[in-house]
Amino acid sequence: MTSTAAPSAGLSSRGRLLVASGVLIFVALASVVWTQVRQFQLLSLANQYQDDYLQVSLGHLESEYLRLMMLWQQAMDDPAADRAALQLRYDIFVSRVSLVETDRARRTVLAQGDNAQVHRLVKDFIAAADVVLGSGATAPPDARALRDLYPRLEALGGPVHSLILDGSHHLSSLTTQRNVALRETNRNTIALTVLLALAAFGFAVLSLSQFRRLDLRRRSLENVSEELRRARRVAEDASAAKSNFLANMSHEIRTPLQGVLGMLALLAETPLEQRQQERLRTARDSADHLLAILNDILDLAKLEAGKLPTSPQRVDLHLLLADLEALMRAQAVAKGLKLQVVMQPGLPRWVELDPTRVRQILLNLCSNAIKFTAQGRVTLKARADDARIRLEVEDTGIGIDSATLAQLFQRFGRGDESRARRHGGTGLGLEISRQLARLMGGDIGVTSVPGEGSRFVVELPRVDLPAPRVEAPAALRDVPVTAAVDRLVLVADDNAVNRDYTGAVLERLGHRVVFAGNGAEAVAVVRAQAVDLVLMDLHMPEVDGLAATRSIRQLDGPRAAVPVVALTADAFADTRAACLAAGMNDFAAKPVSPAELADLLARHTAASAALTAPPHPPAARGMDLAALVDLRILGDVFRLLSAHKLDSLADRFVTEARDSVDRMHAALGKGDHETMHRCAHSCKGMAASLGLKALADAAAQVQQAAAAADAAALAPALSELEGLIGPSRQALRESVQAFAGP
Amino acid sequence: MQSPDRRRVLAALPALAWPAWSPALAASPGPTVLSVEGAIRRANGERAAHFDMALLEQMAQHRIKTPTPWHSGEPEFSGPLLRDVLAAAGADGPTLRMWALNDYRVDIPTEDAQRLDVIVARLVDQRPIAVRDKGPLFVMYPFDRHPELRNSLYLSRCIWQLRRIEVR
């Protein structure tokens, strides 16, 4: 901090120096301009020329005075002398006198000493001489008059000389003053120029050093950032090494932990007291939790190492969300929460995604939401714009404060510790989810209001894919193919949620379910009812799954042979061996997906029941259903409408179709091919939209014949169309029933 | 490069201007107030072109109104253009040596007369100029239209009591 503060202080003082020298340069330049202007003024004053000229004129005045004296003497002595020349000379003298009468001359020359007096003497003489020589002179000048005036002219000699000397001296001193002033301003200009040069030099030096400093600073910053980069690399390497170590250790720990779990499972089979069983259950829960943590750590390590691959594939997004809803519903219901999955219009169905990872993310977010919500609802909203798919998990839970929010996605950054302890979990889930989302080119964001709830938003890039070419109707695919047969299944599980979930899935699959809360109850149910399949949780209080199975196998009669499938969270070879040893038929890891459950049922009830073949919608009378109905189209319609609505739509369609046929008969009688064409066309459209392909084809035939005005073809085509209406209705009804399930 | 061209142009100018006022330099019966001598091609006297006031008055008159160092106020000078006077005498030389009554002289380039409307003023404020008032002829530069001329050089070329022009 101080190391950055000090240079910045230096910088600002340097900056001040720079500004100061800039100001100095400006002031110096302004002064130079001012001085130059002054100099220009001094030089351009007309006084200079006037004074020079006055100086010359003074010289002229004296010489003209002397020339006039000479000519005057000649004229006095020689009566034949040129009087006109004298007159001219006199006028020239007078004109020279007027030169010292200008304003400038009065202020300079005549203002000196007795010069004004001298000027008056000269003017007096001129006034007297004008009588003889002036322009108004009446008579030509005669020698006598000239002689009379001569003494006065001669008397002017001394004063005029002194006037000229004084005036000249004064003008010289004025010139000198001006020169001094000029020199002064010149000197000032030089001084200012020197100052300017110095200031400019200083400015340049300062700028240069500033540049050098900046350069140094830049270079040191570069060094620092290079060091930071290096340090970061080192830190990242160290972190990677630690993660690697952690992953390795987790892996190492997992192996003995599996041993512990296996042993616990075996221990659970031995006769135990109530308290021992409780302790065993606690130990098992802890071990399960530990295993979950280890799995998370492994996931994370793989993510960091880039070893967790995503495998994007064509996915039915609607189905994925529906599955998710089914999985989460039990959890939500067990906590008394409302779970809602909202697919907004425009959500594409077939997209390219990694379903496993998306499911992992959403399961994590949803189970978190359920975990941290005491009452209210959890909503999963799915929508899409052109580029992204947005999956929002919203809850009305405790919310997250901003401090926690900031580090929510960071490693082990989970709410606060107390909350974590209260709700369990590894705290790695969110980080894993975010990393997975990023791995898929998306991200996870969160907004939350403490006390009101949180909203996690998963954004994934949207890649639309065309629907697969051959696709079984979704409803049929959704519910795997044992639907036609209803089985009685016993679900033995002490956990009510698990029980409810499994039961719900089974019912959805079209089976009946009975429940048992522990092993003893399970044995009692099998003894009392003809159960088709037992789904047995291994760990139950009092009598566990293994013991119960052994008891069942010891029953009398065919009920001892009922298929028993173990459901357990720990899928270890030891456990599996224990199950088989106890007489179980199969083994499934919890939670069991609907598909797995269906598969199990198909597998284990095949031996005891004949109907395991994939069900086929029952054939229409005399007609193959598949020939009448395009199940793909109907499946799509079925997804949009409820079975009830579809049924009433089908009724309406039949009425319309029959009307149409009646109209066509009437039109046929009249030879009105146009009406026939129109009716056949609308009939074809309706049939096609419901997937009634045979009917649509027949209507097309009629339409074609009508268009061709082929009367011979029209009648048989129309009767074929008419004959197809009934079977199509029947096929539609049966297909809808098949989709809807029992 | 330029000066021969310019000289040729200047030489041609009097010839061009010639027919403008008179086919030949008229005689000047009155007292001569201005003589043009030296390199001239027309004369009405012995190797000189003599002008009396009447002759100068016949030529086109121009006016210049300007303050001067020798006058108070802003007098108006009027008289013929110097170049017309030179053309009348067929003057052909780059320099004009101007002489005053008292034998003061100043040399001015002929180019000044061609380039600028320099006049030989014979009236100040519409009145003839007495010798004692620096007359009878006063060379005046057009300071009113060319303020930039107002400096010592051109002021010194404004010779007064003009008597003689020697074309060199």
Image (cartoon, rainbow, N blue to C red):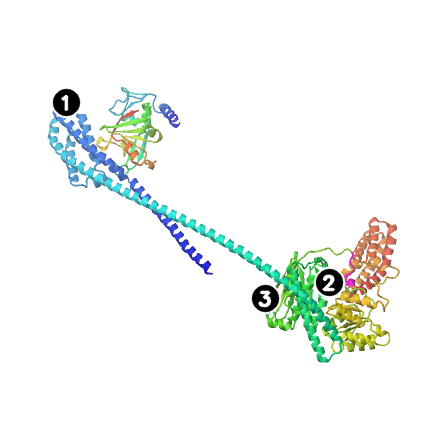
Is A284 drawn above or below residue A133 in the view shown?
A: below
**Type of the residue with mark 2:** Leu
Circle 2 SS class: helix
Report crowding for label 3: few under 14, some 14 to 19, many 20 or more residues within 10 A (C-alpha): some
Is A153 drawn above or below residue A547 in the view shown?
A: above
Mark 2 vs 3, N-terminal side? 2
Q: Is residue A139 visible?
A: no
Residue nearer the viewer, A294 or A495: A294
Q: Is residue A545 visible?
A: yes
**Type of the residue with mark 3:** Leu
Residue A319 disc label: 2
Between the C-alphas of marks 1 and 2, the distance is 150 Å
Is A469 drawn above or below residue A267 in the view shown?
A: above
> Closer to the observer: label 1 or label 2?
2
Circle 3 SS class: helix
Q: Which residues are magenta?
A: A470-477
Residue at image mark 1: A80
Residue A405 disc label: 3
Between the C-alphas of marks 1 and 3, the distance is 134 Å
**Type of the residue with mark 1:** Ala
Q: Quadrant of the C terminus of chain A?
A: bottom right
Residue A515 magenta-drawn?
Answer: no
Q: Let me know if marks 2 and 3 both belong to one chain.
A: yes
